[in-house]
Image (cartoon, grey):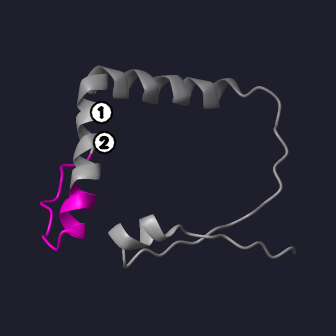
Amino acid sequence: MEVRNITISEEILEVCPEFSMAAITCEVINSPFNASLWQEIQYFSSRFASKHNIEDIKKKAGNTRHAASVQKAGERPKPLPAFS
């Protein structure tokens, strides 16, 4: 197994001082077309799209950036509701 080094930028560590991560590597061999898998992907995509629009997703992303800046300023951000 080959060891790889991952570097986390100082900018990330400044806004997320308790940052931790794990990484897994693997070799993947794609299988032939799987109709059942694609049906599941299409079902999930349709369901997600029916519940969320791009503006809601943008707001969530903006709130995440705001929470990081609030945390950097020493305040505790309010938790955001999760997508379902």
Q: CA distance from mark 1 to mark 2?
A: 6 Å
Whether residue 68 appears in magenta in the rendering, the answer is yes
**Left or right side of 10 for 37:** right
Instruction: Verify CB contact (< 8 Å) between mark 1 and mark 2.
Output: yes
- Vertical comparison of 58 with 71: above or below: above
What segment is highlighted magenta in the picture? Answer: 67-82
Where does the image place residue 48, in percent across and percent down from the top left?
35, 28
Write the residue at 58% across / 72% down: 22
Quick one: label 1, few (<14), some, or many (20+) residues within 10 Å? few
Mark drawn on residue 78? none
Write the residue at 27% across / 60% down: 68
In the depicted view, which residue is nearer to us: 2 or 52? 2
Quick one: label 2, few (<14), some, or many (20+) residues within 10 Å? few
| Mark 2: amino acid | Ala
State the residue position of label 1: 57
- Vertical comparison of 20 with 28: above or below: below
Specify whether residue 6 is in view: yes
In the depicted view, which residue is nearer to us: 73 or 46? 73
Specify the quadrant of the image occupied by residue 33.
top right
Where does the image place residue 81, in percent across and percent down from the top left?
18, 49
**Left or right side of 59 for 39:** right
Q: Quadrant of the C terminus?
A: top left
Q: Quadrant of the N terminus?
A: bottom right
Mark drawn on residue 61? 2
Q: Secondary structure at mark 2?
A: helix
- Vertical comparison of 35 with 21: above or below: above
